[in-house]
Image (tube, helix red, strand yellow):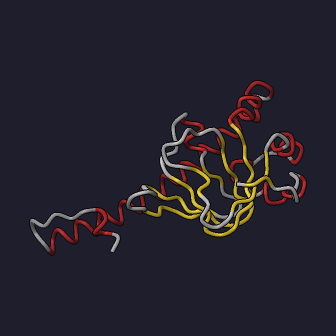
Amino acid sequence: MTPCTTLTVKDVLETLRNVTIFSGFSDEELQNVCNNCSLFEARIGEVILEEGSPATEILIILKGLVTIVLNLEEEPIEIMEFGPGSCIGEASVIGIQSHSASAVVIEDATLMVLPRQELMNLYNNDKALFSLLILNIARELARRLYHTDEILLHYGKMGKQHELQHPGAVLKLKDLAH
């Protein structure tokens, strides 16, 4: 990622208003939180989060597309795509865990980086706003979990159908994707 020198937080305020983790923030609150964030540009093919690396920031996609990939170095499995207004890395930052997947840019992107330290500053200086941010992150993660449950249910049904048609056959998850 390279620093973005052509934009400021004020320039992207409209996009930030539509980011789900900032729901309920006033423009002033949004600007105060984002003033300590950095803007970056990333090119197609660039890995912006690496599976297994420490989570130190939340990335907010302002422009472009990013795909989440498991097992990038061996047998990559694309999980989901994210576009403008989405954020990635928040589960790992909040959970104080390493990243569970990699993120790869698939369309040139502009990103805002919300460092963990800024979250801690918000916690120390404005607990009500910090609480709203964490609630919004929890809601976003719940929506993603629901989506994942729907996918697993779909594949589970496919597996049952396969079992009925081929008794005794072993079905692997990768077989379901074809």
Residue 52 is situated, as x and y percent measured from the top left of the image, at: 48, 43
* In this rendering, position of residue 115 left or right of residue 76: right
Q: Is residue 61 above or below residue 90?
A: below
| Residue occupying image coordinates x 65% and y 38% | 134
Q: How many marks?
A: 0
Q: Quadrant of residue 133?
A: top right
Between 84 and 111, the residue placed more toward the observer is 111
Between 117 and 153, the residue placed more toward the observer is 117
Residue 13 is situated, as x and y percent measured from the top left of the image, at: 85, 55
* In this rendering, position of residue 133 left or right of residue 142: right
Q: Quadrant of residue 126?
A: top right
Q: Is residue 65 above or below residue 115?
A: below
Q: Is residue 178 above or below residue 141?
A: below
| Residue occupying image coordinates x 74% and y 59% | 41
Quadrant where the N terminus sits is bottom right
| Residue occupying image coordinates x 79% and y 52% | 3
Residue 138 is situated, as x and y percent measured from the top left of the image, at: 59, 43
